[in-house]
Amino acid sequence: MRTFSAKDAKYGFGMLIDTARAEPVTVEKHGRPVVVVISVEEYARLLAVELSQKTGAGKTT
């Protein structure tokens, strides 16, 4: 996972987007992680996993 400072994320927003499309990116402010930027595809995958866990899909009894 790559890490950007908030300043680098602000001034290099295009690079942040390009990087986040390939892998999650942590953005730090004052040296502390504050957000993670992910691609829309990864977000959709995580939502699908969460939904399947809530509905019980994939569980064996």
Image (cartoon, rainbow, N blue to C red):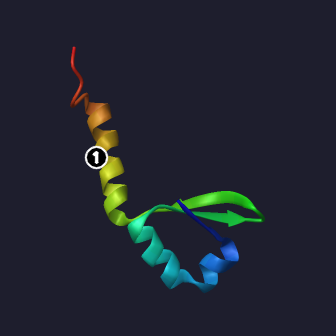
Is residue 34 shown left or right of residue 21?
right
Residue at position x 39%, y 65% in the image: 39
Is residue 53 shown left or right of residue 29?
left
Observer-nearest of 56 and 20: 20
Give the percent coordinates (x, y) of residue 16: 52, 76
Provide the secondary structure element on which disc 1 rests: helix
Q: Residue furthest top?
A: 61
Q: Specify the amino acid type for callout 1.
A: Ala
Q: Is residue 25 above or below residue 61?
A: below
Residue of label 1: 48
Residue at position x 49%, y 84% in the image: 14
Give the percent coordinates (x, y) of residue 42: 35, 58
Q: Is residue 9 above or below residue 27?
A: below
Is residue 20 shown left or right of residue 35?
left
Q: Is residue 4 above or below residue 44?
A: below
Count of numbered tags? 1
Q: Label 1: how many residues lie within 10 Å, few (<14), some (14-19) or many (20+)?
A: few
Q: Where is the C terminus found, in terms of image quarters?
A: top left
Q: Residue furthest right?
A: 30
Q: Quadrant for residue 57, please give it.
A: top left
Observer-nearest of 47 and 12: 12
Q: Is residue 51 above or below residue 24?
A: above
Q: Residue furthest front?
A: 1
Give the percent coordinates (x, y) of residue 6: 67, 72
Residue at position x 65%, y 58% in the image: 34
Residue at position x 37%, y 57% in the image: 43
Give the percent coordinates (x, y) of residue 58: 21, 30
